[in-house]
Structures are given as structure tokens and as C-alpha cells.
Amino acid sequence: MSTDVISELKEKLRGVALLEHSIALLEWDQETYMPSGGSESRAAALGEIVGIKHKRAQDPALGECLSKAEEFAAGSGDRDLQALVREVRYDYEQAIRIPAPLASKIAESCSQSMAAWKSAKDNDDFPQFAPLLEQQVQLQKEFADCLQDEELNSYDILLNQYERGMTSARFGEICKQVVPELQSMIERAASQPTTSPDFMKGPWDRDKQLAFSREVATELGYDFNRGSLDLTSHPFCTSPSAPHDVRITTRISEADFTSNLYGVIHESGHAMYEQGLDPEWEHTPLCDSISLGIHESQSLFWENEIGRSEAFWSHFLPKMRHFFPGRLDGVSAREMATAVNPVRPSLIRVEADEVTYGLHIALRFELEQGLFDGSIQTSELPALWREKMQEYLGIQPDTDRDGVLQDIHWSFGLFGYFPTYLLGSLYSAQIYQAIGKEIDIETEVSAGRFEGILQWLRTRIHASGRKRLPLELLEDATGHTLDPSVLISSLDRKVDLVYGN
Amino acid sequence: MSTDVISELKEKLRGVALLEHSIALLEWDQETYMPSGGSESRAAALGEIVGIKHKRAQDPALGECLSKAEEFAAGSGDRDLQALVREVRYDYEQAIRIPAPLASKIAESCSQSMAAWKSAKDNDDFPQFAPLLEQQVQLQKEFADCLQDEELNSYDILLNQYERGMTSARFGEICKQVVPELQSMIERAASQPTTSPDFMKGPWDRDKQLAFSREVATELGYDFNRGSLDLTSHPFCTSPSAPHDVRITTRISEADFTSNLYGVIHESGHAMYEQGLDPEWEHTPLCDSISLGIHESQSLFWENEIGRSEAFWSHFLPKMRHFFPGRLDGVSAREMATAVNPVRPSLIRVEADEVTYGLHIALRFELEQGLFDGSIQTSELPALWREKMQEYLGIQPDTDRDGVLQDIHWSFGLFGYFPTYLLGSLYSAQIYQAIGKEIDIETEVSAGRFEGILQWLRTRIHASGRKRLPLELLEDATGHTLDPSVLISSLDRKVDLVYGN
């Protein structure tokens, strides 16, 4: 027994990771530059590589090599190696427990279901989508059954696909604590209605928006030598090969510059996480992000904690004026920070502000739980959606398009995914607080110095990869266990800023 | 025995073609949008897929299936099936005859050699490149030995990699016929020196150039729903999946609009060929181009026969004026056609005009033959280059950078590739002549009607894929065997146009 077995394991992992590189690029291209006529061929080409990858990921030879590597790691006293084999074991068990026919059925059903969802949304016709949604729920239950675990129910198993170590019981507690606080903030904000100031009005030149956003992303620390910024209808971040090739995309609204600017900052936050993964562990799970919640904490940190602060605008307002001469001359950093932090109940999750956002998540979490414990039928969703919107946000959609049909997630079978958005906010607030104890964030940001902050994140969060699970990572990095009150206090201060005391 | 064996064969071919899709995309991205930091990882990801593809292409199971398919096709009386198995056999024999160690050695040597060539070119230091060039020659000899054929010598075997059915004896005859004619045209042109007219002078706005070129490509018939146009340092055409996804790239010079315009038309010609392949045979050799010469005939047809004609400018001058108001008001189509058809000996092949171009090819062909029959040593190349340039074009480079080091091809082991450029011109001239017997090309082009011409090419050339070999395809399409005098007459007329009688 020697380190040979570790080399062999790494070689096998590399064989999987190199295929994931191609998969990521094929998918990125599909959203950016692929001509529309290429979509069918692309689906086939992707399916081929995905198939080869699956085979490698569940290869019995990998399992044998892994067993030997586990034995070696156990006796080595090397914690990194132990984390490595733990994570490889996790992936391998997931891979071998899902039978190929179920995986194909899910893949096939997703593509049908997504098409049905698109059409149902266009036509505001929920019943058209309902049977496929029902099928997605059933398939995800089957999927969860394959990963059966004594401690976790089906929904928890799905939740753990995205956020290891989280349970619906715990997330339910979080919602119970957070929801009423957010509601009271909304009430405070509603008592002093604001309108968007004139200086926010468009049109804003598209090319200049993009040039400004690119400059911001560069200054914050997104490395364009290992990244790119392209246009898509839905912004995303993807890594053909982290940390060496980590790309983001964005969209532009001429009417509202915040869509592009905060979109770019958000995706840059995701990308800086992946660019900060440890290249020493390239092609292994230790050079991969640990969870969606941690990922979202990085995007939200830069978008909300940094990007929507007065300090941010102290530094960037003069630069923005350079791109838009004469447009923002009389505007102060304080006014801009106020303008980009509205609190207003709205129907669409992706357009929601920082305060109301959590309520959109709580609503979805509640409905998902009901779908999986059998207390809610898919047919009841549109009515329940309206009811819950009224309860949480005090408004109701006129159409299902602006209601239960708004998100693509369920059509892909992504149940248990939404909670990670709120978890990302919680982590982000705690990370901000922890950094604040070591670095004078406002002074640094006002002066346009972001290296210290990024370095903190690099060392404490990014470089960890999958060595520690999310809650352990949070605690090691911040010195505190998960505590929703930190986000609540942070949002409280923001509401004070915008809506006075 | 039934058509099941054909389905099985197609399924196996599809497994190779779908990997080629990913390879093409990874390579395309490498030249277009990949951040520089991603290059090492990309090489690894590419190598992985190429390896899997090679394995599939020489899989003994494919060989067995092919043998059965050949038996079936022979008895079927179906000529398409017979062409299919003939071409699959050709590819399969090529694949199994090259031992894996040699393939790896060539791949490795190419990447070293390309780096050495780049550096040698930058430093004008041929001796630095010489040993690697020597190695490339040796490796390509070994490669040719693996494909040994009684009728063909080593160089012929390489030539056949790019142009099936061509021999150095025949290409030598072509050069013998063409070279003195081109030389006499150059003399005629030189007797009446011209300078580029003032209206050609830059700067030309980059975005407008691109918009105009895109409009031209669209009108000629390049289908952007199945294509795209992106920027790279060297223009190329690639098909992740012909005929559904066929992409081109271009570059822009502010000083000279012809670089972009004719580059785009040229690549569109390549792309229209691939877009015209028969989707019924997708993922098989019958939905693939037959040779580089035929490919080049399509790009040169649109670039030179159509794009540099007076009729072309009759239609497109008003459109170009729309993009560049006031710039070309007094210019006639005749003047423009004259301006874009200069005849001037120059040092660099890729900048050469239509007449002098063939001499650059003849020179390279002669040197390549010498390298492969042993009559020329690599160390003699710089001096021989100067000598031949003097002989063919009457000029000599001051540096090897502008001489023997100018092209990348040899550093990749591409010997026998250059002749296809001249063959493309010959084919193109014959195709133009043949179309002219059925369609009044000048009238159609002047009126901006390109569908009839494209349809002719689609039916007679594109849709054939690899069903017929190059010379057979040319003869079937044009009714004539290969005849260099057609190009000679065509160029003669152009020289008359530009330099008077």
C-alpha cells in the first residue's frame, strides 16, 4: 500500500473531470453562441459525453481503487486525503445507487417537462403543465428512494443534493425565525413609500453598461485572464475548468442599469469562489464547490453586502460618471445606495429585493414539503400559491404565469433547491460580520481596495473546496454556528438606511 | 443479413461523430472565447475526448460490423450504401494502420514543433526550428509508411490525406502548365503599374465592416440560423455538426476593408458547402466534405469568381455606401472590381492575389517533394526559398520570417496540404464555367439573386458529400475532367480587366 493508490484514484477522477469540462463548455455554448439550428445535434452530443461520464463515475474499478485509497488515507493521518476519499465515496455512492434506467427516465422527462412548462407559462395554462409536474415529483421521490437514508425523508434527501447537512426540520426553524422579521421590515418600509429617484431612469447605453460592469468586476477581483463575460437571456456562472476557466454571463436592460450591474457582480461572486479553489487538487472533489448555499453566499456577499453599500458607491460613482457623463453629477453615494436598496413586495422572485426575497423562498419551501409529504396535490398549487403570497407578502398574482409557473426549477425536478438561496443570504451576512472584525470593510471599499476582503474569502472559504461540509466551513470561517439573527440585524440596518428610523 | 447491419453501422459512426462535435466545439472555443488561463486544461480535456474517439474509430467491433455491411451493400445494388461502406472502410483502415504510439508521438511533436516555429518566426531564427522540422518530416514519412500503398510514394500518400486521387506526378504536370502562364500575366501587369485608388484608403469602422460583411454573407446564402460569425486572429470555418451548426470566424483591419469582407465571403463559401451536406446522412462520411481541394473550390468560388466581380459590386456598392455614407459616392462598380483585383508579386502567401497565389503553391510543392524524395535537406530550405521566389515571382525576402518561416503548416506536419489551395482555384474556375452554361451569372449577381447559383452548388457539389471522389465529382458536376486551362483563361480575362489589353 502506498501513495500509488492515491495517484491511481486521482487519474480516474481526472478522467471524469475532463469530461465534465467538455459538458460545461457544450452547455455554456448552448446558451451563448450556438446557432438555434444546432440544438438537436447539441442535445445528442451532450448526451453522448454525459453517458460516458456516468459510466466512468460508477465504474467498479473506481470503487475498488477507492476502497484501497480509503484504507490508505485512514492510516495516513492526512486530513486532506481523508476528506478526498470521503467526498469521492459520497459521489461514488450517489452514482452507483441511481439505476441507469431511472437516470434516463429523469433526463427524458426533464426535457419534456421543461418544454411543457415553457408552453404553459407562455399560455398561462397551469393544467397543461400539471401532469408533467406530478411526474417530476414522482420521479424525484423514486430518485430519493434510491439514496434512502434512515435519518432523512425523501425531501431531506433532495435538499441534501444541494446543501449537505441541511434538513427540512432545521430549515423550517430558520423560516419560522426569519419570516416574521422580514414581514415587519416590509411593514416599516411600506409606512414610508418611496419612489425610484429620477436619476435612476433609463435609457442607459448597453455597451457602456457592460464596460462599467466589467470594470467593477475586474476591480472586485474577478480575473478575466481566467474568465469571460458574455450575453445570455438568463445570467449564470459556469466552470469548464476551475480555477483556470470560470465564465460568467449577463443580460442588459436599457431601462434599468441595476439589472446588468448587480447581475455581473452576483455572477462574479460565484466566479471568484471557483477561481479561488485550490489548483493543487484540480480534477478532484477538493477543487469543487461544497454546496449551492455556500456558492450563493459568495455571490450575495459581493452583490448585496459590498455592491449595495454606500462605501461601494463612494468608490464607484465617479467611475460610473465617467461612463455616463452628466448623468449622475448631483447624486451622492448615500442617495445611490438608497436607490439600489428598495423594499417592496413584488410577484417575481428573481426581481425581488433583499428583504422580500426570503419570503418567496419560505413560500416555495412550504409548498415543496407538502408535495413530498403528500399533504399537497399538484392541482392545488395555483390556489395555494395565491394564498401564501397573500399571507407572506400581502399581494397576489393575477395569473399563474406570475405565480406558480414563474420558476423553471420544478420543471427540471429541482425540489429542495430553493432553500439554498436563503441559506446563501444567511451565510453571507455572517461572513460579512466575521470579516468586519478583522478588516475595516467600509474604509477599504470606499478606497477601492478589495484585495484584503477577497483574500479573506480565498483563505477561509474558497480554498477549502469540499474539504469541509457547509455548516462546518461556516463555523470554521466565522467562528460562529449558523445564526439567522445576523441576517435579520443586517437587513434591519439596511431598512433603517433606506426608510429612516 | 438485413438493413439491421446498416443501422448498427450508423449507430457506431454516430458514436464517433458525436465526439467529433465536442472536439470541434472545444477547438472553436479555444480560438474565440476561451480565457488564456484555460489553455492547459483545454489541451487535457481535448486530449481526453480525442483519445476516446480514436478508440471508437478503430474498434474491432466497428470493423466486424463494417465487413457485414460491405457484404450487404455489395448485394443491395444501392450505390449510396456502397459509397458509405467504401468511405467507412477508408477511414477505418486509416485509423487501424496508425499505431497508437506513433499517433501520440506525432501529437506531442506537433505541439513542440509549433511552439518552436512560433518562436523561430518571432526571432527570425530558422536554425532553431530546423531540427523540429526535420523531425516532422521523419514522422510524416513513418506515418506514410504505415499507409503504404504500392502505387503511391510517401509524399503521394500524404497528398492523398487531403486530396484523394491526386498524385505528385499529376500535380507536377499542372504546375508545369500553370506556372509560365501566371508568370506571363504578372509580366503584363507589371508593364502597367497601378496604385491602389484613394477611395480604398482606411480607416474603415470595425463594427460597420462587420455589419456589412454579415449582410453580404447572408445575401449570398450563408444561413445564420445554422451559423455564427466571431472574431479570431486567423479566420476559419468549423462544423460542430454539419449541416446544422457550421461556424465561421474573421478578423478586421481598419486600414483595409477587403481583409474582412473577402475573408468573410471566403469562409462563408466553406460554410455553405458544409451547410449543404445531406442531413439524411448526418453522422456518417456521406455527410462530410470530400476533400480540401473541393472545400477550397467553394470558398474561392464565392470569394474570387463572385465576390471580386463587377456584377457583385453593381449589387453591393449601394449597400456598402449605406454603411459608409459619403465614402464611395463617385465610385463605379467597375472601379471597385478593378481595385479589389490587383496583380502584384508579394512575399506572403496569405496576402497574395489570385494570379500570384499559384506560384507560392508551386514553390512549396517543389520544396516538399524534395524533402520527401531526399533531394533537399531541411538546412537548405532558406536559401532554396529565396532562389525559388526569385525564379517564380522575381522577388526575394530579406528575412526567413517573410520566407520559409511564414506558414504554420509544416510545423504541424502538414506536407502535401498546399497543393489543395491551387486545386481549389482550378476546380472553382471550372465550376464557374459550368454554371455559366446554365445561368446568366452576371445578370443574377448584379440583381442580387444568388439562390440559383447556390442551388446549383448544393445539388451538384454539396449534397454529394463523400459519395464521389474529388475528380469524379468535378467531372459529374461540370461535364469536364480537370483542365487547368480554364483557370488560366479566367485569370487572363481578369488581368485584361484590370490592366487593359
Image: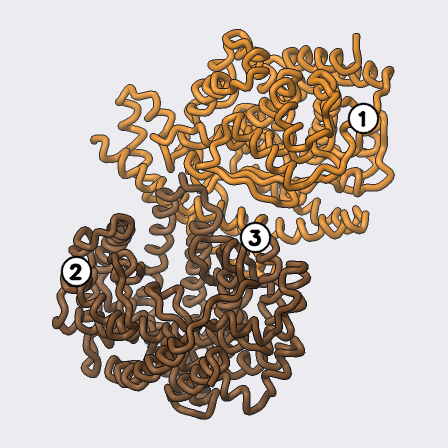
Chain colours: A orange, B brown
Q: Amino acid at mark 2?
A: Glu
Secondary structure of the residue carrying numbered label 2: helix
Can residue B21 be seen in the rendering of this structure? yes
State if disc 1 and disc 3 touch (CB < 8 Å).
no
Q: Amino acid at mark 1?
A: Ser
Look at mark 3 in the image and give the residue it sits on.
B206
In whole angstroms, how far apart are the C-alphas of marks 3 and 1?
38 Å
On the image, the x and y values in percent for residue B74 come to: 38, 86
Q: Residues within 10 Å of mark 2 (few under 14, many from 20)?
A: some
Q: Are marks 3 and 1 on the same chain?
A: no
Q: Residue furthest front?
A: B192
Can residue A419 be seen in the rendering of this structure? no
State if disc 2 and disc 3 touch (CB < 8 Å).
no
Residue B134 shows which numbered tag?
2
Seen at 59% across and 87% down, the residue is: B439
On the image, the x and y values in percent for residue B206 come to: 56, 53
In whole angstroms, how far apart are the C-alphas of marks 2 and 1?
71 Å
Seen at 28% across and 68% down, the residue is: B395
Look at mark 1 in the image and give the residue it sits on.
A196
Q: Chain of mark 3?
A: B
